[in-house]
Amino acid sequence: MCASTLVDVPGPAEKAAEQDRRDLIVTVARELAETEGWAGVTTRRLAERTQIDMGDIYRHFADLEALIAAVAVCAFADLAADLAEAHAETAGSPEGVWPAVATAYLDFAYTNPEVYDAMLALTPDLALGVDGVPAAPRAVFAELRAALTPLAEGRDPDTLAEVGWSLLHGVVMLTRGGRLRPEGQEDREALIAQRLLRWP
């Protein structure tokens, strides 16, 4: 008998169970991060919350960086879905798409600050210009691009989407850092969503 035939090859059920465990670890890490910050996300805490052996957690995620990246990719997928939903809800009103998408983006960022940091501050390898970036971050960019393309007026839609994303990200980070006037928040966000990049 060939030695290779003695190796157990995981079947579909085992693969599904492994994926379920991985998903649970990511979900619990995300919840811990939002309630206690990333410092509260430890292998011991994850093992307690998930009832998964610490060794199995390390088998799925070699270190905290790998886990943060997995949380970030999952969160990018959620954000892309939120943006797509906002876009779909304004399909009959093209001039309303960018304001709706911008509002959905800001809502997500303010509601999930630790996860947002994982997406855009703690995972430099998820930058759009890097080869092999997962589909989820690219999907967020695609939704922003789709919302802004009608406003391009001959300008490059990719560049316009990068500028739009930069404006949203900048206002989120400066607001969270307490660097901007609290009383001006609504006006700033309205300016980005409705006037600065307005329908031609």
Image (cartoon, rainbow, N blue to C red):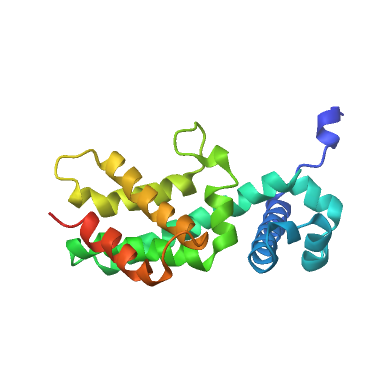
Percent of width and height locating residue 195? 21, 60
Give the residue drawn at x 45%, y 33%: 129
Please tell me whether residue 54 is drawn above or below residue 100 in the rendered image. Answer: above
Where does residue 155 sit, x and y in percent of width and height? 19, 39
- Residue at the spot 51% in from the left edge and 42% down from the top edge: 134
Determine the residue located farthest toward the top in the rendered image. Answer: 2
Q: Is residue 101 left or right of residue 19?
A: left
Residue 143 in the image, given as x and y percentages of width and height: 35, 53
| 83 left or right of 127 in image | left
177 with respect to 181 (left or right): right
Q: Quadrant of the N terminus?
A: top right
Quadrant of the image containing the C terminus: bottom left
Residue 44 image offset from top left, x and y in percent:
84, 59
Q: Residue at x 23, y 48 (%)?
A: 149
- 110 or 140, which lies in front? 110
Foreground residue among 119 and 61: 119
